[in-house]
Amino acid sequence: MLFSSCFIGITRFLVVIVVTNALVVPQTPYRSRSVFQTSTRIRSSTISAIDSSSSTALQSSSNNDFVPLKKGSTVALVTPMNPDGSLDLPSLRTILRHHVASQTDGLCILGTTGEATTLTMEERRIVLELAVEEVKDKIPILVGCGTINPTSVKEQTLQAIDLGCDAALIVTPYYVKPPQRALIKHFTDVADLGMPVVCYNVPGRSGIDMSDETVRICSEHKNIVGIKDATGDLSRVPHLREICGDDFLMYSGDDGTSAQFVLDGGDGGISVTANIAPQRMHDMMKAAIAKDSNKVKELNDPLDILHNRIFCESNPIPTKYALMKMGMMPSDMARPPLCQLDTEYHSFIEEALKSNGLI
């Protein structure tokens, strides 16, 4: 009887241990598969030269597939959606091909304009795979991977690497207002993953402004290749150029001041207007890079009405309406917490489109 009681007690104890251990096993986060799947991403001419037993060699060779970012007009791409809120992939394909034909210099996908905060990791995968299929090696693919949680940032960046994208756009963590030293660590930790990084400074949305010194320190990391500056403060451009050097890409994130930003020493813009007038934005940015101020004025003055009016409500609501009116996609659906454009602004946007011959 005593033996039986002891046996039952020991058995219950062991069951508790097993169950407890099972409960505390953490979920495995998304991991980069580049080490294990590199054979699909390495050019055939290099495969024979790589020691398959060396994961370091495999990882570094995968960097050969990163298409360098360009100066000029990078579109902050919308994500087309059906009326029920699902992804509209045929329209996305049409829009991507339109940007190739329009000489858009860069594709910034899954950023704020792309409503990335409302997309699941699976939806991100679908969108990025389509983008890679359509524009890889034609237009560099810069992926918005920034959010408030560093673990999520890394997860999204590793996914972008695995799917064959070219760089990650990382915003300053919003709402929590990290100190400058924490911003430096945030950006450099992501850059250590091996993908080129563009820092995104947008204090109007994030609540924190990267100081010029923070930008300079970040620019010293070999994988931090540029900044998207959406401060609208043109006085900072010459100083940033001086302290970060000529090889550090400086993109404007403010359509209204992007032309002057480039004339003052910037390299281009990450543009919402480029969704609607991609060829003109490409031409205008090239003129600004060439310091042809007369040509810039000629090209940019008609666009001013677009630069201003597509922000009459929260981005990308007006831009989606404009693209629908242009026949680029059948619906202007924006996922909650956003919504479709208020009817009082319909004529407001249509007038801007008509003035530029877009409808």
Image: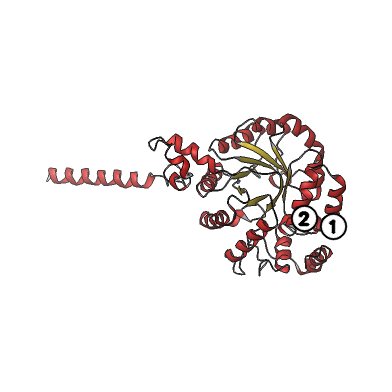
Q: Of the residues tagged 1 and 2, which is closer to the observer?
A: 2
x 81%, y 68%: residue: 347
The reply to whether discs 1 and 2 touch (Cβ–Cβ < 8 Å) is yes
Q: Earlier in the sequence, mark 1 or mark 2?
A: 2
Secondary element at image label 1: helix
Q: Is residue 232 visible?
A: no
Vertical position of residue 124 compared to residue 348: above or below? above
Q: Which residue is mark 1?
A: 302
Q: Nearer the viewer, residue 201 or 25?
A: 201
Q: Which residue is mark 2?
A: 280
Vertical position of residue 248 compared to residue 296: above or below? above
x 72%, y 65%: residue: 321
x 81%, y 39%: residue: 264
Which amino acid type corresponds to the residue marked 2 in the rendered image?
A: Arg
Label 1 neighbour load within 10 Å: few <14, some 14-19, many 20+ = some
Which amino acid type corresponds to the residue marked 1 in the rendered image?
A: Pro
Q: Is residue 196 visible?
A: yes
Secondary element at image label 2: helix
